[in-house]
Image (cartoon, coloured by chain):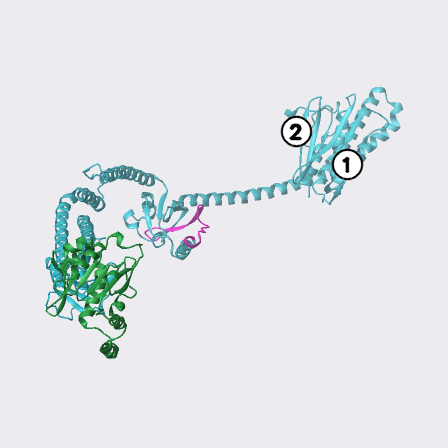
Chain colours: A cyan, B green
Amino acid sequence: MLRNTPIKQKLMIVILLVSGAVSLLTSAAYFTYEVITFRQTTIRQLTLLGQIIAANSTAALAFDSREDATETLLALRADPNIVAAALYDVQGNLFASYPTNLPDSTFHPEEKRKGYYFENKFLFGFEHVVQGKKTLGTLYMKADMRVLNERIILYVSIGLLVIMTSLLLAFLLTRKIQTQISQPILELATKAKVVSEFQDYSVRANKLGADEIGTLTDAFNAMLAQIQSQNSALSESSARMIAVMNSALTAVVVINSTGHITEWNSHAEQIFGWSRSEALDQELANLVVPHRYRDDHRKGLHHFIATGEGPVLNKLIEMNALRRDGTEFPVELSISPLRTAHAIAFCGFITDITKRKQAEEEIRSLNQELEQKVAARTQELQIANKELEAFSYSVSHDLRAPLRSINGYMTIFADDYTSKLDDEAKRLMTIILNNAKKMGQLIDDLLEFSKLGRKELTKSRIHMREMALSIYDDLKKPEAPRQVEFTVHNIPDVKGDNATIRQVWINLISNALKYSRHTNKAVIEIDAEEQDDLITYFIKDNGAGFDMDYYDKLFGVFQRLHTAKEFEGTGVGLAIVQRIISRHGGKVWATATPNKGATFYFSLPKQ
Amino acid sequence: MVLTTRQKFTFRFSTPNFVLLLCALLTISVANSKAKQPMLEYQVKAVFLYNFAQFVEWPKQAFTTDNAPLIIGVLGADPFGSYLDKTVKGENVNGHPIIVKRFQKIEDIKNCHILFINITGKDRVREICEQLNAKNVLTVSDMPNFTKQGGIVKFYVEDNKTKIRINLEASKRADLSISSKLLRVAEIVNN
């Protein structure tokens, strides 16, 4: 009930109530004590009187002396409160009374209780008159208790006076002293009001004492100082924040959970055409989201608020946005939820990507053009290649007939005229024959190579190890035994065209044998390595090797790194190998050191 | 103790019953008193005699033992009839049961505490009283000049009421201590 009362009055009321209650209780206790004591005292006095009178009345009763009894009772005059007394003999007859003209109806001995008791503002007393052990009669007394009532009235008056005086005194003292307590509180309250109304944190409360309120005042001032410094730090940091935001080359937009704009930096002003003051408190959807996306935007926002699921959050997305003039333009956008203790907001970083989109579009069209050009060129090349192959095939095919006739006639010529020729002529003839043979070999290889481009590949499982071993068996020349250590490790099988892969092995193994011919002991090793989707086979020898500087010529047609004198050959073998492997979708490469050996690798896809 | 009995009843019964009973008892009492009851005056005196036992202290040698009887004697003609016996019946004072004895001659009195003297020979009273003083006997009589002749207590009638006169000197001679309360209601003489 005192909640809204000013503290001054509260203090006053509390002190007055307490002092009033205390003095009331004290007075009541004293009053009760006095009344009880007074009644007890009265009873004790009456008892004493009764006993004295009774003791003095024995002889009068015993010897029938009413005068004496009357005289004894008359002694009660000394106590003005005793209004009546009567002495009854043992038979219950009235023997003497005080005052003498007491009406007979004052006491009814037969109805009276024994002892002393209060009744109707009177104290009644009863005493047996006893001599020795003999009861001689009964004494009754009646005392007026008006005195008690007078006393009660007196006590109550005094009590009320005391209470009034103490209340008055308490009031006066409290009025003086309460300012000691209420003044500092009022000071604090006034300052607190100033702070909360005007947000003026530079205000300080005056400390009026070193008590708890003084401590409170210090704490209040310290709090204000802290708020002030934090406020300035906060405004500085927020100013810095705004400066950072405005210096960004990206539009920074913050919306609250209802989708309304709470932050709008200067770049946002530039790209959307709305000033900060216009944009703030507007719904983002209404301002910059094209009509067809607005419902989706709102649904997405509600969905996130309800479930916390935001599939478009925290990633870069591209969409169209609306300018103030109603035109749409492409933007790149990332939205991050900003969770604070009590609310959620969303921060969007928006970049105008109109130019980028244009650039991308240009690149795309250029690429497309390029691809078209490449395709056209490739087709042209393929046609040219085909024509070239057809040409070289027909050339080599057409060359074979005259060469065969040269060869044939030269053989006849040798058979028929050898005896008629001198040694020089024989030598020249042999050179012609050898060159004609070599040319035949060249034309055969060229034909073979040309055919490879047209041949269809039929793929099946090939047992590579067996194939390598059988080829080696075919190739080794029993007529010229040499020391060869030929090892084929447990290499995996592969799917490929049996005939062409066989050709690959033939070419590689015969090369290895050929180029290791000049070593004392040829060491040839075949092994393989499996990768994820392909198998790399390799063949290693300890032969002549080659200079890696000329590596780019290694797989060219008719290209040779060694002279025909050193090692015979046409320079088509490795070109064939490369052609076959590349038609299988694989690759060929090699490493070598001159006079130390070479390793040739080819990889084939597992499927 | 008819009246005592009546009082007991009166405490127990309500007023209408009490009145009926009172009438019945009074009728019986009156009928009895015609034949045997002494005069009202002697009934009072009988009670007084008994009451003296309460207000008088005897010297120790007056009782042989602590519970020896206190003897109320009547010398000469007995005016109380059976009333005195009825009055003291069952009563005792300080452990001494009260009994009544009747004596015809002074010589019969060997042990007595209160003696009511009712004899005719006037001259002998002084002598008797002196003898009895030595025996610590409270002598009582309603004879004229009793106290003047050395008696201790005399009953006399004034305004139609029985009153007491005490010869304090005689009581001292008999080595009796009479309560001041008793003395207050009595007329005191010194002979």
**Residue A481 in view here:** yes
Q: Residues within 10 Å of mark 2 (few under 14, many from 20)?
A: some
Residue B81: x and y in percent read 24, 71
**Residue A137 in view here:** no
For the residue labelled by badge 2, is the local secondary structure a helix, a strand or a loop? helix
Q: Residue at x 25, y 59 (%)?
A: B112
Residue A39: x and y in percent read 19, 57
Residue A465, numbered label: 1
Residue B11: x and y in percent read 26, 71
Q: Quadrant of the C terminus of chain A?
A: top right
Is A326 covered by the magenta stretch? yes
Q: Residue at x 15, y 43 (%)?
A: A177
Q: Which amino acid type is shown beneath numbered disc 1?
A: Arg
Magenta range:
A304-327
Q: Residue at x 22, y 40 (%)?
A: A213
According to the picture, the residue beneath numbered tag 2 turns out to be A553
Is A162 covered by the magenta stretch? no
Same-chain status of marks 2 and 1: yes
Q: Which amino acid type is shown beneath numbered disc 2?
A: Lys
Cα separation, mark 2 vs mark 1, equals: 29 Å
Viewer-side residue, A262 vs A435: A262
Residue A379 in the figure: left or right of residue A190: right
Viewer-side residue, A499 vs A532: A532
- Residue A377, compared with residue B74, is above or below; it is above
Viewer-side residue, B94 vs A355: B94
Residue A286: quadrant of the picture: bottom left
Residue A61, numbered label: none
Chain at numbered mark 1 = A
Foreground mark, 2 or 1?
1
For the residue labelled by badge 1, is the local secondary structure a helix, a strand or a loop? helix
Q: Residues within 10 Å of mark 1 (few under 14, many from 20)?
A: some
